[in-house]
Image (spheres, rainbow, N blue to C red):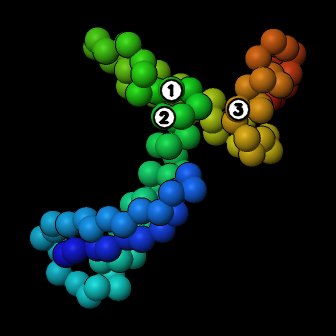
Amino acid sequence: MWVERVGIRADKQYHEIVCYISSLIGTTQEFACSIRSHWSIENCLHWVKDVVPKEEDSTIRLGNAPANLSVLRAFALNILHRNGHTSITIAQRFLSNDIDKLLALVK
């Protein structure tokens, strides 16, 4: 299936044609819904983990350490969201030097 994307990112227009390959059989609408659902997860979770704690820049590569740290990052992000922080960057700045505020999040 071919998908054409047109829009504006960072004040620049873009036009992309992307090919998706799948063994699933369905309608165009079902396939489009699946694509949107995938990107929703990517944008809501993975992007945050890539940009804010810079998970992809980590130099930790051996054994279970990368997976363990990924779980800890997700845990920390969930605690911040659960306590009403919508901007992870602002929450980090607000909480980073105050252990009492950090501990209050997990009570």
Q: Residue at x 73, y 41 (%)?
A: 87
Q: Is residue 67 visible?
A: yes
Q: Where is residue 8 shown, x and y percent of the image?
A: 52, 63
Q: Residue at x 86, y 21 (%)?
A: 101
Determine whether, in the image, residue 103 is placed left or right of residue 18: right
Between 2 and 85, which is closer to the camera in this rendering? 2
Between 13 and 26, which is closer to the camera in this rendering? 13
Q: Residue at x 78, y 23 (%)?
A: 93
**How packed is label 1: few (under 14 Cα within 10 Å), some, or many (20 or more)?**
few
Determine whether, in the image, residue 15 is placed left or right of residue 9: left
Amino acid type shown at disc 2: Asp
Q: Earlier in the sequence, mark 2 or mark 3?
A: 2
The residue indicated by pointer 3 is 89
Q: Secondary structure at mark 1?
A: loop
The image quadrant that residue 25 belongs to is bottom left
The residue indicated by pointer 1 is 54
Amino acid type shown at disc 1: Lys
Q: Where is residue 51 shown, x and y percent of the image?
A: 54, 34
**How packed is label 3: few (under 14 Cα within 10 Å), some, or many (20 or more)?**
few
Q: Where is residue 89 shown, x and y percent of the image?
A: 70, 32
Q: Where is 30 relative to 61, above or below?
A: below
The residue indicated by pointer 2 is 50
Disc 1 from disc 2: Cα separation: 5 Å
Q: Residue at x 25, y 65 (%)?
A: 18
**How packed is label 2: few (under 14 Cα within 10 Å), some, or many (20 or more)?**
few
Amino acid type shown at disc 3: Thr
Disc 1 from disc 3: Cα separation: 12 Å
Q: Is there CB contact under 8 Å for labels 1 and 2?
A: yes
